[in-house]
Amino acid sequence: MLKIVPLKTKKNEKIKLCVIDIDDEDNDDDNTNNVTIPFGVDNAENEKEISHTKKELELEQILNDLKSKQTPQPNLSYRIRMGYVWEDFVSYQQKKFYPPIGNLLINFVGYKCIDTAGEKNTGPKREFFTLCLKSMEERLFLEGAPLPSTVLVNQEEFLFAGRLMAMSLVQGGQAPTVLCDMTYSFVCSKNVPLPKSYEVSLEFLNIPLMKKLKEARNDKEFQKILLEDDMVSMLTDIGYRNNPALEQVCNREEILRSLYYKKCIEPVVPALQQLCSGLDVLGVLDMIQDNPTAMAQCFVRNLRKELQLDDLLDIMKAEFSEIGSNKRKAEIDIYKSFTAFLEQCAFDETSPLNLENVLMFITGTEVIPPLGFHKEISVKFLHSCAPDCMCLPTVATCALDLNLPIHYKNEEVFSTIMTNSIQMCQGYGN
Ligand SMILES: [Zn+2]
C-alpha cells in the first residue's frame, strides 16, 4: 500500500512529499515494526520522491524559472507619493506613453533613497510593492473576492491589480497573497465552476428567501416559496424552465446553486477576467495555470504565513568585532538586547509591535519575499558615539543594514528606543 506523507523539512525549504511503502503486516519480511521511514534518508531504498503532484514543479523552481526567463524589461521610473501609492501606480498605468510592464524603479517623492538602474538597491521597490498591494487589496477586494464594482472594472483597476501582483512576484516584492479560493480557482481555470455545495456562502443563505428555501421541509412548502413574487423574478433571472408549482424539494440544491452563482459570482466575472488579463504578463498566468497547487502559496490569502522569529533570525547576520576584543563584548550585549526585543515582538501579546513591523522597518517589506532577499540583513554596531549619546538605531532598507549604537544600558532601554524608532517610521509613511 502506498501512502503520501509530507516530509518534515527545515524552514525555508520546499515541502517534500514522498511515497512510502507501508506494506501490510502479512507482507512484511524483515520489517519488525511498521514505522514508516521518510524518503530523503539515504538508506531508504524503496521510496520514490515526487513533488506536490506528479506534474507540478516545486515553488522554488517555478519562481527561479520565472525570474530567469525574463527578457530584459524597459526601466520604468515611477515617482510615487507616500500615502497615494495605489493612486499614483494607477495613473502611471493609464498613461498611454508609458509601457505598462517593466523593471520598476521607485522614487518616493520627498525621500532620499531612490532606486537606480543597478539591481541591488531595491529598498524603495520592496516598500512600494508592500504598500501598493495593501492599498489595492483594501480598495478592490473583500476577503479575497473582487468587489462587484462596475466603476472599478470601467477604470480597469483589476487589470492593473493583476500586473502589480505579477511584477511584485517576479521583481523581488512580496508574494501577493490576497485572493480567496474562488478567485484563485478562476485564475487557474479562467472560469468558475458552479459551487460544489450551496453552503459555500453563509452570507448568501442569510438572504431571507434563500433561508426559507433551505429550510423548507417538504415539496409543498418548497413550491409555496418558489411561487412568491420575488422568487419568481429571481427564477426568471436564472433561466429556470420548470413549473415551480410542481417542483420537488430534492432539487433544492440545484436551484440554490444557480441562484448563488447568479447573485454572488456572475457580478464579479468581469473583474475576474480583467484580473486574469493583468496577470498574463511576465509568464505568471501560464505558470499559475500549469502549477496551480504550488503557486497557490503565493496568491491565496488563507495560505499567507505568519512571520516566525526563527525565520527572521535566520536571515540576519551580526557583524561582530574580533573575538576577545572589548568592542565585541559590548556588541554581544546589544545583540542580546536586540534578540530579547524580537522575542517580545514575537511572543508578548502586550507588545505594541510585531515581527512584521520590525521586518518592514529594516527591509521595506512585511513578509520575506518568496525567493528571499538578495543578501542577509547585516546588523552593524556603532562605537563612535559621544558619551551620553542617546541616538536611535538606523536602517538602510536598500543595503539591508541595521545599525545599532552600543550605548543602551539594558534590555528595557533598548526595547523602548527600538519601539520608538519603528513607530516614528510607521508614522511618516502615512
Ligand atoms: Zn549614539
Image (cartoon, rainbow, N blue to C red):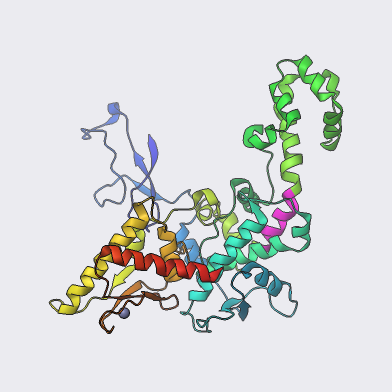
The magenta stretch spans which residues?
268-278
Q: Ligand 1 is found in which quarter of the picture?
A: bottom left
x and y, in percent, of residue 339 in the image: 29, 62
Q: Residue at x 59, y 80 (%)?
A: 109
x and y, in percent, of residue 177 in the image: 54, 56
Question: Is 204 displayed left or right of 338 in the figure?
Answer: right
Q: Is residue 281 above or below residue 205?
A: below
Specify the quadrant that holds the N terminus.
top left
Viewer-closest of 359 and 317: 359
Residue 274 located within the stretch drawn in magenta? yes
Q: How many marks?
A: 0
Q: Is residue 45 above or below residue 205?
A: below
Question: Is 65 displayed left or right of 334 in the figure?
Answer: right
Q: Residue at x 83, y 32 (%)?
A: 235
Q: Main secondary structure of the magenta part?
A: helix
Viewer-closest of 250 and 419: 419
